[in-house]
Image (cartoon, grey):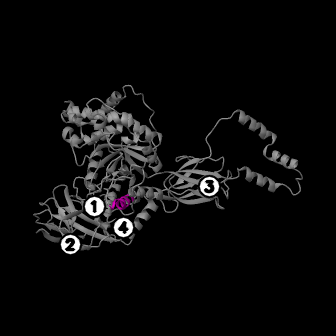
Amino acid sequence: MGGAKIEIRKSFSRNNFMVAYNRNEYNATFSQKIFMEKGYYYTFSAWVRVSEGSETTVSAAIITKENSKRVIASGNAYPGCWTMLKGGFQPEFPLPTELYFVCYNKTVDFWVDNVSLKEFNKTEWLQHQQRAITRVRKRKIVLDIKDKLGKAIRGVKVNIKFTKPYFHIGCGVTDTLLQHKKYQEWFLKKGFTASVFTNQMKWYWTESRRGIENYTIPDAMFQFFKKNKIEIRGHTVLWDKPKMNQYWLHDMTPKELLATAVRRLASIMARYSNDIFEWDVVNENLHFKFFEEKIGPQASGMFYHIAHVIDPNATLYLNEFNTLEIPGDVYAGPHKYINKWRQIRSYPGNEDLTIGFGLQAHFGLGKPLMPYIRAALDFFSETQMPIWLTEMDVPNNSNQALYLEEIMREAFSHPGVEGIIVWAPWKPGMNCTSLCLMDDNFNNTPAGDIVDKLMAEWRTPDQNGKTNSEGLYRYDGFLGDYNVHSLWGSTPDWEATRCLAELLNDSITSWEELTNAFLERFFPPSKMVKLRDNIQNFKRVRGGVKSVNAIGTISGQFLKDSKFEALHNEEVNYMENQLEGAYPNYPRPGGNQGWKEDQDNSWRERDWRDRCGNWRDKKAEKDRYVPPHDHPKPREPPRPEGNRIEELLTRIFDKVEGSNKVLKGLEK
């Protein structure tokens, strides 16, 4: 295509691959005519490489019905190693088309191998999602109830209530939350477990005029969510988009800007430290470079290092748009995003830092490309870092509810995703051109119905039953927190029935004899003395309900006087694999992710995760993300306000300055 010469070459391992050379156009590569069926899902993958030079942006594209280009995958190619290009497409009408590659460096030879385009109908796609949800989001739970001698107890009544999911679904809010009681009631009734303030934590909101900070509104919003035990994402500390920074920041010298930015980090993060569980530290630093152009290319790395010093218990995130929404955005594709993540972690002191991927997911009017979304999530999950859809919305059109459900199901079924924030803030009288979950009377829109339906579907129904002859009670449940009630041998009617059954025939001839028998059985003199002492020394204690975090199989004693506490209590054994086991990722390391089980194994010749130094560190365990609930961090005690910011700034500079060339240069 495009006048290039094409030939087949052999690798040292005798593997054939194609080469396009003598190229004089970006699209002077390879092409293939294909036909795509309406309503089908097409997954695409290929291995790519260039002959020389450095990192080169490459894409795979198709010709649309309007004879225009539609990118279905984009990434980077390198000399000396093969990398995976991966994506997909969903045609909305029958489409005779041409699939071709674009290499944005005309001076290099372009290599390609093992091109795959596979077709799936909607039933197959949804079946895979459901299997993934069962495997990733649920566990087979077993309550094993024994007495103090280790003997199984049959017939113990068990009541189990699902109280909080491990997977977060939240909603963005504005300051109108403070002014409308019904808005607050609506939010709490929905059952959201997380929230984000759409604007109220941003720098231009809290310090519009230089040196005058005002946290009145975000403080009030923060207290509402803290009181109701709803997690808050901190959005955003800094923003790399020039026009989103106050005018007075633009006129600063590099040293002034650095000091002011660090003060901003200390001001907001120290204020809410230990309460905000995730922070977007530098927003949109793939598309924009305000701080990098002013301070230096390592500005973001330095800010993430400082942020971790201020709030070491919080997970830090990047946050970017168009990564899921538009495959053709060469600034924010998965490869570019991961390269930025690697750059930030290369800053001294950041090597082991958990830095998650925030995917804004502001989708446009067209149909979201589910195969491309899945491919992008696969790429990010290979880093073993947490992934969130941080600002997800879909424009208001006739397909809004349909597209919203497709996106949420795809995200929930992927093992790398930990939460979704629905970007649906409400203001009275607003013209809902984007995503609204309710009207001004707080009645659901069709999109609101979808969110309700999915949140209900992804909760474990209440369980009521009895243990079997082996003392076991089994059920399938979603990962999360549960309240468990057990009842055995402790109710007055049960004890009375047993007492009557044990009386000898004709041993009771009057009510007086029956009364004496009951008093002797249930209230002997020694018990009466103890009961009197207990009443005199009464102290209220919590009882009845026992909280558990259902991560896997639960086994342990469970009587009226036994202990059944939360996760990490050694008296209860939590096993992650009872039958099917826990799957931290999709089973395939590369290729087209094996949506069908009969897929070939042609990807095995190249370990796409490790062959290129640009892709992923080979020290896999060093990069592995451990969810917060697996290794809880102790909360730091509250610190006195006083000169808190000044103390933090001193502490930050003391820790960072020694290894920071940027700071040293600025001081000079």
> Residue 567 in the image: x percent, y percent?
52, 48
Tell me the residue at 41%/42% (across/down): 180
Direction from residue 474 to residue 122 in the image, left or right: left
Residues at discs 4 and 3 in contact (Cβ within 8 Å): no
Residue marked by disc 3? 158
Judged by depth in the image, the label closer to the viewer, 4 or 3, is 3
Decide: is 99 above or below 662.
below
Read off the residue under disc 2. 32
Q: Residues within 10 Å of mark 3 (few under 14, many from 20)?
A: some
Q: Pick out the residue farthest to the top.
A: 642
Q: Find out whether residue 400 is within the magenta segment.
A: yes
Q: Label 3: state its secondary structure.
A: strand
Between 539 and 340, the residue placed more toward the observer is 539
What x and y, as percent, mark residue 6? 15, 70
Residue behind mark 1: 366
The answer to whether residue 253 is left or right of residue 135 is left
Q: Looking at the image, do the residues carrying marks 1 and 2 touch, with CB atoms under 8 Å apart?
A: no
Looking at the rendered structure, the secondary structure element under dot 1 is: loop
42 in relation to 206, above or below: below
Question: Around disc 1, counting alpha carbons within 10 Å, would you say few (fewer than 14), some (14 to 19), or many (20 or more)?
Answer: few
Q: Point out the stretch of residues depicted in magenta.
A: 398-408
Q: How many marks?
A: 4
The mark nearer the N terminus, 4 or 3, is 3
Q: Is residue 223 magenta?
A: no
* Number of the front mark, 1 or 3: 1
